[in-house]
Image (cartoon, grey):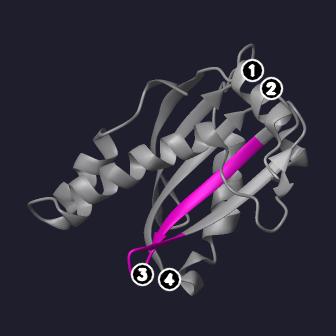
Amino acid sequence: MAVDEVALKVLADTHHARAVRPFGVHEVAGHLVKAYGIEAPGRAVEDVAAGLSIAEAHLAGAALRGSLGVAVLLVHAGGDGDYVLVHTWIEGDMSDLAVFVGPVGGPEGLRPGRQGLAPCVWEAAVFAYERDAWVRHVLDGDGEIGERLAAWSADVLEGEVR
């Protein structure tokens, strides 16, 4: 069997909750961008300016990828480095994801992650929440689209994820 039981046990033994803080909704490159910070123990996201700058560059060409003009930004102060993820809702109930990685505390060193890199367990928890908020307020919501987007904007995850 190819299951690495030793590595899985280490992961299970060291798994912990991480703080999640909302940083508002911003207009970036023609998109509504809901921003979050995720914090490993001992780390803090003071602001999301570097993440918004990366998101702006990425979203500038998002129309070519079918963007609907709505995105979620995660700025993750991780235990082993810093991460910025830009998740954009696109046509056909699909999404587009860009992951940027860099050294701890070095936002100028953030670069696109390797092909195939996907969200970690904490980032996936925020994206799961956001997927449900998107469906609840925008796709299945009532009222005009502006009202639906306002409801989505106000629905934020705060506290801890595991």
Estimate the spatial distance between the alpha carbons at disc 1 and disc 2, rounded to whole Å.
Answer: 6 Å
**Structural crowding at the residue carrying mark 2, measured as other residues with C-alpha within 10 Å and reported as few (<14), some (14–19) or many (≥20):** few
The answer to which of 36 and 6 lies nearer the viewer is 6
The residue shown at (81%, 53%) is 1
Q: What is the C-alpha distance between the residues marked 3 and 4? A: 5 Å
Q: Position of residue 18 (x, y in %)?
A: 60, 23
Give the x, y percent position of residue 148. Answer: 20, 57
Front label number (1 vs 3): 1
Q: CA distance from mark 1 to mark 3?
A: 39 Å
109 left or right, relative to 46: right
Q: Is residue 35 above or below residue 32?
A: above
The residue depicted at 62 percent of the width and 40 percent of the height is 121
Vertical placement of residue 21 versus 98, above or below = above
- The residue that disc 3 covers is 91
Secondary structure of the residue carrying tag 4 is loop
Please state which amino acid type lies under the numbered disc 4.
Gly
N-term-proximal mark, 3 vs 4 = 4
Q: Secondary structure at mark 2?
A: helix
Query: On residue 10, which mark appears?
Result: 2
Marks 1 and 2: CB-CB under 8 Å?
yes
Q: Name the quadrant containing residue 141.
A: bottom left
Question: Contact (CB < 8 A) between labels 3 and 4?
Answer: yes
Residue type at the position of mark 3: Glu
- What label sits on residue 14 in the rendered view? 1
Alpha carbon separation for disc pair 3 and 2? 40 Å
- Residue type at mark 2 is Val
How far separated are the C-alphas under marks 4 and 1? 39 Å
Magenta stretch bounds: 83-95
Mark closer to the observer (1, 2): 2
Q: Which residue is mark 4?
A: 66
